[in-house]
């Protein structure tokens, strides 16, 4: 028995695969601040469920958020309640469902592949999937996509067992319907679509090849399966339509979904081949074997297979029917975001695992191997380049020129501390990627995959645990918090100050969801934040967060002058904080924050 045989059997295979994804994402879960905009919107809506005790309607502050179903919000709320409580403002508790979802997606990939391509190939494919940049990135973002990948892969694994006639048919049908129901409650019909593509694709392929599509899908008609799907999905959808006055489906389908299908929603468009180009980085390190996977699949379908699959080439046809239509659909879709194709990644990774076993067993593909090495090297170079201090400093210098309210030199001086960060994991990633290429060139496929996975882990730890947390200039809400701390202006942090803290912050010129999520639901921002001081002494202290790079009307300098004059007329004390600078990556604009604190009467 080979080392691969030993590693792919027993509990250790499942434990190792789980740990690959879980460990890869861990630094990002706990160290990266709340991201804008989708993550913070999801987390804020989940936090409000705990605060208000309403687990039917999805709200962002005082507005209904009629976009995605409730599944992820329930899980985020449960995670936050278990680890902290409704008053907590930390983002990491909301990331736990995505973190676990991504790790279980890796296990589901392994489980799905075993009846299709065998245990050895499935183990390698799942390991490659578990280390991909896209899956491990979604694992530390508190939204739907990592969990969707898990549930979709679980459903496809059940379909794979029905198709390959392994397992108890009715049990597999129940798993398929349960996974699809849960996935529908997380992100609507996406998993149904992917499963439909795979089932219809392989049925039509078999029909054309043999004249009969087969009867493998009939257990799905067993009544308890569809009934379970409806039992999972319908209660909340009926309830939310009732309590929202019929506005949820109108917003989720009539606006959110139709906008994505009808055009480039929110400006997220891209040319044909967008996802293919992005896979150079997003599918890293599995990109090393993508070209060999294509070639090995084609050879096997032509009858040139060296390693028996146990079910002929049925497994390959199923994986191709899973991956190709899903990928093409999202390439055609006008709205393009890199994570849209994640449901196709498990099938592609399993094809890569199949190619690896074929090459380990003697299949010669020198050109495909060489092209895979070129793609892997390009992906590694891109990842290592963008995470090198010299490159971040270059970008920093360019962004510092865009400030209109302050000189470039002042911004660069404030950002000086962010120009350098440790390179231990960067160097390890560089070395491991290089060794992976060496081993691949020597046709030592198992060693190359091991080193490639380790390279992805090291680069990911560098980016998520070192680079991004150290670049405070890229985290505008954290910069806003630093500005508020200058004047003891962070709500709920009275123990850190010797003066009263405000009940809420009034932000002018800044309204990112992370501001609401991490500083508190009660905080206001433009256009709802008042621009005049209250006359009631009990309303003080009043704290404003001013963004002097705001492009709104009237100009922030005019608003500030009016507030200053009003404070003088009321006899209020004004305490001005220092300037803090950042880049708001959500809209690509610079921010220049200053916190102003007003106290009634004399200064404390």
Image (cartoon, grey):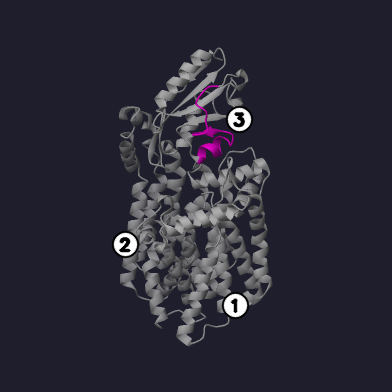
Looking at the rendered structure, the secondary structure element under dot 3 is: loop
**Residue at x-position 53% and y-position 15%:** 572
Of marks 1 and 2, the one in the foreground: 1
**Residue at x-position 35% and y-position 28%:** 405
Q: Which mark is residue 166?
A: 1
Q: Is residue 26 visible?
A: yes
According to the picture, the residue beneath numbered tag 3 turns out to be 492
Q: Are marks 2 and 3 in contact (CB under 8 Å)?
A: no
**Few, some or many C-alpha atoms within 10 Å of disc 1 (few <14, some 14-19, many ≥20)?**
few
According to the picture, the residue beneath numbered tag 2 turns out to be 374
Task: State the extent of the magenta-drawn residues as a range.
Answer: 513-533
Rendered location of residue 5, percent (x, y): 52, 70
- Residue 227 sits in quarter: bottom right
CA separation, marks 1 and 2?
A: 38 Å
**Few, some or many C-alpha atoms within 10 Å of disc 3 (few <14, some 14-19, many ≥20)?**
some
475 to 344, vertically: above or below: above
Q: Is residue 19 visible?
A: no
Residue 524 belongs to magenta span: yes
Looking at the rendered structure, the secondary structure element under dot 1 is: loop
Q: Are marks 1 and 2 in contact (CB under 8 Å)?
A: no
CA separation, marks 3 and 1?
A: 57 Å
Rendered location of residue 258, percent (x, y): 48, 58
Circle nearer the N terminus (2, 3): 2
Residue 460 belongs to magenta span: no
CA separation, marks 2 and 3?
A: 53 Å
The residue sitting at the bottom extreme is: 211
The residue sitting at the front extreme is: 245
Give the side of residue 512 with respect to residue 434, left or right.
right
**Few, some or many C-alpha atoms within 10 Å of disc 2 (few <14, some 14-19, many ≥20)?**
some
Of marks 2 and 3, the one in the foreground: 3
Front position in the image: 247 or 96: 247
461 to 555, vertically: above or below: below
């Amino acid at each position: 028995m080979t080392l691969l045989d030993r590693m792919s059997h027993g509990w250790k295979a499942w434990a190792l695969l789980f740990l690959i994804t879980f460990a890869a994402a861990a630094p990002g879960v706990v160290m990266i601040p709340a991201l804008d905009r989708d993550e913070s919107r999801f987390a804020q809506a989940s936090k409000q469920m705990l605060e208000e005790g309403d687990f039917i309607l999805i709200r962002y502050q005082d507005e209904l958020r009629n976009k995605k179903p409730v599944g992820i919000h329930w899980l985020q709320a449960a995670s936050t309640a278990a680890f902290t409580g409704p008053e907590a403002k930390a983002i990491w508790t909301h990331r736990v469902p995505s973190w676990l979802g991504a790790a279980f997606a890796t296990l589901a990939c392994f489980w799905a592949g075993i009846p299709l391509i065998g245990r050895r190939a499935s183990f390698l494919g799942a390991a490659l999937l578990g280390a991909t940049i896209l899956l491990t990135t979604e694992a530390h973002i508190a939204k739907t996509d990592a969990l969707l990948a898990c549930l979709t892969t679980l459903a496809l694994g059940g379909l794979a067992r029905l198709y390959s006639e392994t397992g108890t048919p009715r049990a597999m049908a129940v798993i398929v319907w349960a996974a699809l129901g849960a996935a529908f409650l997380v992100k609507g019909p996406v998993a149904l679509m992917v499963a439909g593509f795979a089932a219809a694709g392989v049925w039509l392929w078999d029909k054309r090849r043999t004249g009969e599509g087969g009867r493998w899908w009939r257990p799905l008609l067993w009544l308890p399966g569809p009934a379970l799907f409806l039992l999972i999905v319908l209660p909340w959808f009926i309830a939310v339509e009732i309590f929202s006055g019929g506005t949820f489906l109108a917003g989720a389908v009539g606006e959110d979904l139709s906008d994505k299908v009808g055009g480039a929603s929110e400006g997220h468009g891209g040319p044909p081949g967008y996802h293919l180009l992005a896979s150079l980085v997003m599918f890293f390190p599995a990109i090393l074997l993508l070209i060999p996977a294509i070639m090995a699949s084609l050879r096997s379908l032509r009858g040139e297979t060296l390693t028996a699959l146990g079910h002929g080439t049925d497994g390959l046809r199923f994986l191709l029917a899973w991956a190709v239509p899903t990928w093409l659909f999202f390439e055609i879709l006008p709205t393009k975001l890199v994570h849209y194709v994640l449901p196709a990644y498990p099938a592609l990774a399993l094809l890569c695992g199949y190619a690896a076993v074929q090459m380990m067993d003697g299949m010669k593909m020198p050109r495909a191997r060489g092209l895979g090495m070129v793609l892997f090297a390009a992906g590694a170079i891109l990842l290592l380049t963008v995470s090198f201090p010299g490159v971040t400093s270059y970008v920093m210098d360019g962004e510092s020129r865009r400030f209109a309210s302050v000189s470039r030199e002042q911004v660069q001086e404030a950002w000086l501390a962010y120009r350098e960060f440790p390179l231990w994991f960067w160097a390890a990633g560089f070395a491991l990627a290089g060794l992976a290429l060496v081993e691949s060139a020597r046709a030592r496929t198992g060693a190359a995959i091991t080193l490639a996975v380790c390279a992805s882990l090291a680069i990911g730890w560098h980016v998520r645990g070192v680079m991004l947390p150290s670049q405070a200039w890229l985290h505008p809400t954290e910069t806003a918090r630093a500005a508020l701390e200058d004047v003891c202006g962070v709500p709920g942090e009275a123990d850190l100050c010797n003066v009263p803290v405000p009940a809420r912050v009034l932000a002018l010129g800044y309204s990112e969801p992370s501001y609401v999520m991490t500083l508190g639901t009660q905080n206001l921002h433009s256009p709802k934040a008042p621009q005049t001081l209250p006359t009631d002494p009990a309303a003080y202290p009043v704290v404003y967060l001013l963004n002097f790079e705001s492009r709104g009307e009237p100009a922030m300098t005019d608003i500030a002058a009016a507030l200053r004059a009003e404070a003088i007329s009321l006899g209020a004390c004004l305490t001005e904080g220092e300037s803090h600078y950042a880049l708001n990556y959500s809209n690509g604009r610079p921010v220049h924050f200053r916190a102003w604190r007003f106290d009634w009467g004399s200064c404390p």
